[in-house]
Amino acid sequence: MAVRAVRGATQVDADDRDQILEATTELVSEVMARNGLSTDDVISVIFTATPDLTAEFPALAARKLGFSEVPLLCATEIAVPHALPRVIRLMAHIATERPRSDVQHVYLRGATALRIDIAQ
């Protein structure tokens, strides 16, 4: 069993609690589905949000999905000029038999622009 990191990101239209929770739920669910994971496979998840998103912690969406025993952390992404606004990112550390090349990173909504090379 190896420890791997899975990346993902999504974008919301506004700094709105419901939008943040909905988009984060979608992102976490897609990461889990595309990688065939259960919460038992997840070691920890770090969420970041761009400085323009403050209406809710993205980790709350994961808690509502059953991540009650998984360590979660939220942080603010650095404010880089001309960066894509209203973006929620995650990096999940997982225990898996998958080789690194088979890990599916997930970029949704407007965040597909961040990684056109791997966005689905």
Image: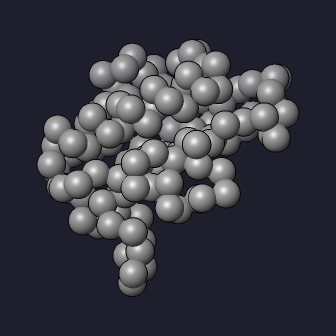
Q: Position of residue 49 (x, y in %)?
A: 35, 56
Question: Horizontal placement of 74 versus 37: left or right?
Answer: left
Q: Relative to 81, is 102 above or below?
A: above
Residue drawn at x 18%, y 56% is 14
Q: Position of residue 91 (x, y in %)?
A: 55, 45
Q: Position of residue 57 (x, y in %)?
A: 27, 44
Residue drawn at x 50%, y 61% is 113
Question: Horizontal placement of 71 versus 5: left or right?
Answer: left
Q: Relative to 13, is 79 above or below?
A: below
Residue closest to the eye, 74 or 34: 34
Residue closest to the eye, 109 or 20: 109
Residue lying at the far bottom in this picture: please name it. Answer: 81
Q: Would you identify the image quadrant in which residue 34 lies?
A: top right
Q: Where's the N terminus, which quadrant?
A: top right
Q: Would you identify the image quadrant in which residue 54 lies?
A: bottom left
Residue drawn at x 57%, y 16% is 38
Residue 89 can be seen in this image? no
Question: Horizontal placement of 68 versus 45: left or right?
Answer: left
Q: Relative to 53, is 79 above or below?
A: below
Q: Where's the C terminus, which quadrant?
A: top right
